[in-house]
Amino acid sequence: MFTTMEQINQFFNDRNGLGIKPGFGRMKTMLKALNNPHKDIKAVHIAGTNGKGSTLAFMKEALIDQGFRVTSFVSPAFGSIREHIFLQNEPISEERFIHYINTLLPVVKELDENEDGPSEFEILVMVAILFSRDDSTISLFETGMGGSGDSTNVLEPILSIITMIDLDHTAFLGDTIEAIAAQKAGIIKARTPIVSGVTQVEAKQVVKDYAARNNAPLYQWGEAFYIREKDQAYSFTSQDLVLEGIRVSLPGKHQQKNSSLALMGLSLLKGVNSEEAAKSFQKVQYSGRFETISSEPTVIIDGAHNLSGTESLIDTVKQSYPHKKKTLLYSALKDKPLAQMIPLLEETFDEVVFTTFHHTRSSTPEYLASFSSNADPKMVSSWEKYIDEIWDDLNGNVLVIAGSLYWLPIVKEYANRKRNK
């Protein structure tokens, strides 16, 4: 039995070597041992290459405002391990987290003894399911990676959402849009509504085929519903709903689309007022998505970690700061399409500075610089030292720090300490 978070953290550190484990056998064993708690929750299941977290955040804010008790599961966590799992807008407490780990411990030990121990991610999903059973009227779950083979796909949701599809995690999900679309579409369940934001013709066809095979009502972005931008706001139109002047607090045009997916999903849920839901979008906050962590000087963090995320960052920074000098402090994991991403970033930012952070898959500054089109790319080994040096010399210009969601929580904590000195 565990009594402290230090013990829990060590427990998970000891399981790091298990990595990503295919199959649902371990999940089903744990669920059965605990009387199938997933059958007792009303879950919304959200997959997609990008936009999962933002779409979830829009839905969560609207549901909370209308009196729902909302639990949510997000991946990756933006901070401590408890920040995978939330009740309303607060992470699960240490006490509850420890309680659920102890609840799971007997069946985890049994699986370990049979040399089929569950991964960290599988255990976290189980904690989220147990917490949701005990403490929610509705639950929102992001997939970790993919969809069909993801541990969250044991859920029996009341609604599924696929935000968008792009090439990412190709070693696990496949190296074509169709293959990745099939992975995401694997969350579609029989006779369960599916909201889709995919745009590629081939991906849309995959989703349509999966929906048809499962008799799942499909609400396709651009067909069953659409939006029109007007004066920093947008209008939303579906068969049963027309709303004007919708504004969102998260910057970037892509967030209008993400919020429209949330709105379409919310309109399908019982007891939700869609017009009031749209008003809630104006106050959503979401860490690491073009988030201003300092206003004087202007310092922004963004989790652009793949090609589509990079393109969204570029569009947003151009829209937000068209006339200011923009510096990018950049680090990324080695398995990303850096040859495509880095030249695009260099076209947008006045200066790009390559660095690294502590992670087993983090790129070195030299490796990142090898994709640069500049004759003399700038590299720093210590991102902390670089931030210290530039902090007081921005002179009204903008520093953006981007490249990996694993890095940004550390950056944000460091910047907060600087501001509070």
Image (cartoon, rainbow, N blue to C red):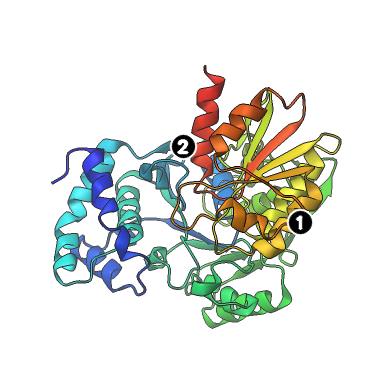
| Mark sitting on residue 251 | none
Q: Residue at x 69, y 35 (%)?
A: 399
Work out whether 181 lies above or below 237.
Answer: below
- Please, what is the three-letter code of the amino acid marked with disc 2? Asn
Secondary element type, mark 2: loop
* Residue 177 seen anywhere in this rendered image of the structure: yes
Residue 5 x/y as whole percent: 26, 39
| Mark pair 2, 1: CA separation | 35 Å
Work out whether 205 lies above or below 151.
Answer: below
Tell me the residue that label 1 is attached to.
Answer: 344
- Please, what is the three-letter code of the amino acid marked with disc 1? Leu
Left or right: residue 349 versus residue 353 is right
Tell me the residue that label 2 is attached to.
Answer: 89
19 or 141: nearer the viewer: 19
Residue 390 x/y as whole percent: 66, 29
372 or 5: nearer the viewer: 372
Secondary element type, mark 1: helix
Left or right: residue 286 versus residue 349 is left
- Dot in front, 2 or 1: 1
Q: Residue at x 38, y 67 (%)?
A: 20
Sequence-wise first label, 2 or 1: 2
Residue 196 x/y as whole percent: 63, 65
